[in-house]
Structure formats: C-alpha cells, structure tokens
Image (tube, rainbow, N blue to C red):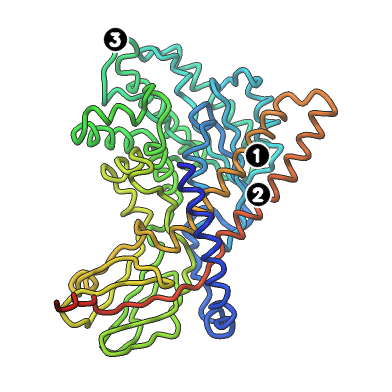
Amino acid sequence: MAGDNRVHAEENMTSLRWCSWCIALLMVGQCFGQTPAPSTPGFALQDGDRVVFYGDSITEQRLYTTYIEEYALTRFPDRKIEFVNSGVGGDKVSGGWAGPIDLRLQRDVYAYQPTVITIMLGMNDGYYRPYDEGIFRTYADGYRHMIDAIQQQLPNVRLFLLRPSPHDDVTRTAEFEPDYNTTMIRLGDFVAALAAEKHAQVADLNAPVVAALVRAKAENPAFSTSLMQDRVHPGSGVHWLMAEAVLKSWNAPATVTAVSLDAIKGVATSLTNTTVTDLRKKKDSLSWTQLDHGLPLPLPPAKADPFVAMAERVSDLDQSLNRETLQVTGLAAGSYTLQIDDRKIGDFTADQLTTGVELARMNTPMLQQALMVAFDTERKDSIEDARFRIAQDARTALDRDAAKELDIARRAAVEQQRQDAQPLPHRYALFPLAQPMAK
C-alpha cells in the first residue's frame, strides 16, 4: 500500500471517528438495539479460531495471508480470529534452512495451538525441472508424512491444503524452466487427492491465477509480465486472487451489505448485513442512518496499485467478495447526488439507482475505515515477522526477552486491528442533482 494512502486513510479515520461518535451517542438505544448482525455459519472461520499459514517464500511474502486476514477482520468484526504466518523462504515438504520438517512443525505450527492450518508447498519441491517421477515421489512421501504428523499431534485441527500457485508460463516464455507449471499442476493433483484421503479441504491457487494471467496477457501483453515479475513470486494483484481462492473454499460471503429502499413509501424493503434507522422522506429526497456489520475489501485505488487494478479487471474478485449494493426504487426521472457523512460519493441517475449501484470501490467512509484496518494489519505483520525471525534462532536470554517484548507489541497491534474494524453508523442523504444556475 502506498504511503500516501496510509496517511490519507489515517487522517480520514480520525475525522470519521469524531463525526460518528456524535451520531453514535444519539443512536445507542435506537440504532444499536436493532437486530444484531446476521451470523454466517457457512464461513469456515469461527470466533476463537487460530489460523496458521504454513509454506515457503510465497507464503512468507505475507500478501495472500494478509489479505485473508483483512477480509476476516472487516467482514466479521465480531469474531476474534488470530492469524500466524509461518512461511519460510526455500522451504520444501522436508523443511529447509529454518530446520527439518518435524522441527518446523513443532516450533512454527504446534506451538501456536492452531485450530486451522493452511499449507502451500511445491514450488521448491519440483526443483524447477520438467516433471520427474522420482522428485514427485519424494514430494508425495514428504507431504504425507507432514499431514500424518499434524493429524496425530492435533487430531481436531481443520486442514486446508492449497494446490501450489503457478509458475508463470503464460505472460512470457523462457529458455530455462519451460512449462514448469505443468509440474506444479501434477503436484497439485496429488495435494487434492491427499486432501480427500485425509478428510482435509483443498483450494486451488493455480487454475484461477493462470486463467487471469491469460486474460491479462490478452488485454495488455507488456504490462501482464509485471504481475509475477520473476515468474515465481506473485505481486499484490495475483496475491488477491490467491486470497480469493482460499476464501471461496471457506464459503466467504460475497455481500458486504445490500440495501433496498422504496422512495415512494419512504421505507426499507430489504436489508442484508446492515441496519437502517431514521429513514426520512422529503419531496424527492431521502436520508437515513446506516449501521453496517461489515466493511468492503480494503483494495487500494487503481492509481495507487495498478497490479491490483488489473487483477480486478481480469477476475471475478469484486463480484465474488466485494458486493456493497444500494438500490432505491420509485425515484422520479433525473439524476441524484449521494452523500455519506456530508461527503459527496457520486451522482447517479434514477435508472442506475433502481438497478442498484455498487459502493464498494467508491471513496466512502466505509472504504477509508477498511484501509485503516489494512494499515493496522500491515503494522501487526511487521511485528509478527520480526518476532518469528527471532524465534527461529533464540539462543540467548536477550533473544528470548526481545521475543517477549514483541509478543506484547503484537497483542497491542491485534487489539488496534479489532478496534478499528468495529462498525460505525453513517448518515446517508440522496437528493436531486442541483440544476445549473441560469445566467
């Protein structure tokens, strides 16, 4: 996330808290006493879950894992879910520089007492060669040993095995490592079969990304090569698609909120994941207070991150995870201005509002709040990363003391995340677009 966007988000968040506090004081009995946020039992992560992301350098990038965490924080602010990243560069199913697999599992997985574990390994296990049966057997045996060990140590853990993300053989070709993604697909087929055998769940982080890369190359061949610059490590846009794949496997709801209002009767006809109060009709205008139970995805503006912008265009990311719909029927023909907390959001025709407008990617107070949560999450991740690296080789009392200090800082950062994700009421106003003054 660009630094300017973090500052802008933090400034807006401060103003947002101040304005919303006054509204909240007036609404405690009226608004907060309404129907509680609907539960979504289908979503895989529940209150109290502790998730460990295990993998190699692609997991260690702290991107798809962070985006998953941001989704959970902003969409389910009432659930306390902990996330730990245990990715280490160069790792294989046998382990790596940070230790052999059994040590890695003991220190970097079991120690956190997870209820959920995701595993993505394979990019290094294929040795960047054409498919080789001996290499495959080593991978299969090592992966099976790892799953058996986890299930013996943590018999109630929920396992999610991730088919390895792709090697980019789409946007460019190379003399070395040609068609290496064929090997990744073969390894992924084994992962899917093992998941079925071991009663684990599986998510495909390969096929959806490959499909998006194909569309990106068709749209802009030159720019598409920047989505995975070294062909192995995805950039921010591709990591969002990987996060989407995991979240879909977790039955993540697509809808942030959905509001339908009848302008003629001045009533709400349908509400999803939100509460509407103090709905007022005045001639052709409407105003209401809305308390949402979730926030949109904290996606940066297209100008700030063109990689995410392209990923959105060549995928169903917004459709699958980021629906924030406002529908208003019964309006007289013409154009209308939508304001939220006295901030102009946009102008829309009556026909557009009748069909429904999507607010998730507009510069709303809700998006600014989500961006603040993303900033909090990045800050927590940096603390967690430092603590993880110290824990890898904590040989002295000084190392152990530093780890304890970072544990305290991490807990404080987690509390800040949760605090900034809590719902805030917003005042909406919809009124006819002002006509130009006559000269």
**Type of amino acid at the residue the image marks with label 1:** Ile
Which sits in the foreground, 72 or 61? 61
Mark before the other along the chain sequence, 2 or 3: 3
75 relative to 227 in the view: left or right: right
Q: Residue 75: horizontal and vertical position, in percent?
A: 48, 59
Task: Give the residue at mark 1.
Answer: 383
> Image point 49% across, 59% down: which residue?
12
The reply, left or right, for residue 4 in relation to residue 210 is right
Alpha-carbon distance for marks 2 and 3?
46 Å
Q: Is label 1 in a helix, a strand or a loop?
A: helix
**Residue shown at the point (40%, 48%) measured from the top left:** 300
Callout 2: helix, strand or loop? helix
- Residues 23 and 296: in front is 23
Using a 10 Å C-alpha cutoff, classify the residue at mark 3 as few (fewer than 14 neighbours), some (14 to 19) or many (20 or more). Answer: few
Asked whether disc 2 touches disc 1, contact meaning CB atoms under 8 Å apart, the reply is yes
Q: What residue type is labelled 3?
A: Glu
Q: How far apart are marks 2 and 1 (CA)?
A: 8 Å
Binning the other alpha carbons within 10 Å of mark 2 as few (below 14), some (14 to 19) or many (20 upward) gives many
Drawn side of residue 230 relative to residue 283, left or right: right
Kindly indicate the quadrant of the structure image that contains residue 428. Answer: bottom left
Residue at numbered disc 3: 175
Provide the residue designation for mark 2: 413
What percent of the width, then of the height, locates residue 413? Answer: 65, 49
Residue extending farthest to the front is 439
Going by the numbered disc 2, the residue's amino acid type is: Ala
